[in-house]
Image (cartoon, helix red, strand yellow):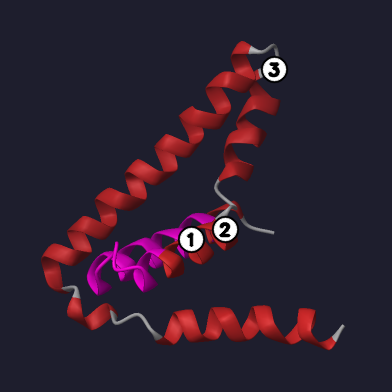
């Protein structure tokens, strides 16, 4: 339908326009780097290690771990709710949205 094809891109457009990377500064860039590192390794360990323990081979476990990084859509929806509820401030929201985009793009097509 038209709404299912139009609303998601509008949602991501509004989210992208609501972040301000210039406010972060050097310390914010360092925070972003730390958040991205923790997110990638956390997702890799949190999904890959259980897959390995449950009997998947190394390659399949790695695939599961890499695919876990593609969950950016769900993260961005939850981040918007956190911002609206006052749980996140603008700087943290910006860092987390960028992290969601970076980890999703890292997985590739």
In-image side of 23 versus 9 (left or right): left
- Say whether residue 103 is magenta: yes
In-image side of 55 versus 15 (left or right): right
Residue 59 lies, with reference to residue 79, above or below; the image says above
Looking at the image, tell me whether mark 3 or mark 1 is earlier in sequence order: 3
Query: Which SS class for mark 2?
Result: helix
* Residue located beneath label 1 in the image: 78
Query: Which mark, by number, is residue 33?
Result: none
Residue 85 lies, with reference to residue 48, above or below; the image says below
Judge depth for marks 3 and 1 and give the one in front.
1
Q: CA distance from mark 3 to mark 1?
A: 32 Å
Where in the figure is residue 25, as x and y percent of width and height? 14, 74
Q: Indicate the quadrant where residue 87 lies.
A: bottom left
Q: Which residues are magenta?
A: 82-104
Q: Indicate the quadrant where residue 89 lies.
A: bottom left
* Residue located beneath label 2 in the image: 74
Where in the figure is residue 69, as x and y percent of width and height? 55, 48
* Contact flag, marks 1 and 2 (Cβ < 8 Å): yes
Q: Residues within 10 Å of mark 3 (few under 14, many from 20)?
A: few
Looking at the image, tell me whether mark 2 or mark 3 is earlier in sequence order: 3
Image quarter hosting the N terminus: bottom right
């Amino acid at each position: 339908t038209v709404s299912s094809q139009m609303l998601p891109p509008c949602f991501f457009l509004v989210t992208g326009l609501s972040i301000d990377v210039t406010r972060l500064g050097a310390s914010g860039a360092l925070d972003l780097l730390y958040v991205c590192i923790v997110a990638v390794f956390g997702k890799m360990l949190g999904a890959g290690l259980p897959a390995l323990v449950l009997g998947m081979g190394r390659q399949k476990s790695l695939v599961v771990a890499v695919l876990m990084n593609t969950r950016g859509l769900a993260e961005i929806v939850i981040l918007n709710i956190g911002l609206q509820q006052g749980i996140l401030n603008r700087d943290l929201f910006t860092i987390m949205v960028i992290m969601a985009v970076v980890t999703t793009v890292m997985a590739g097509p």
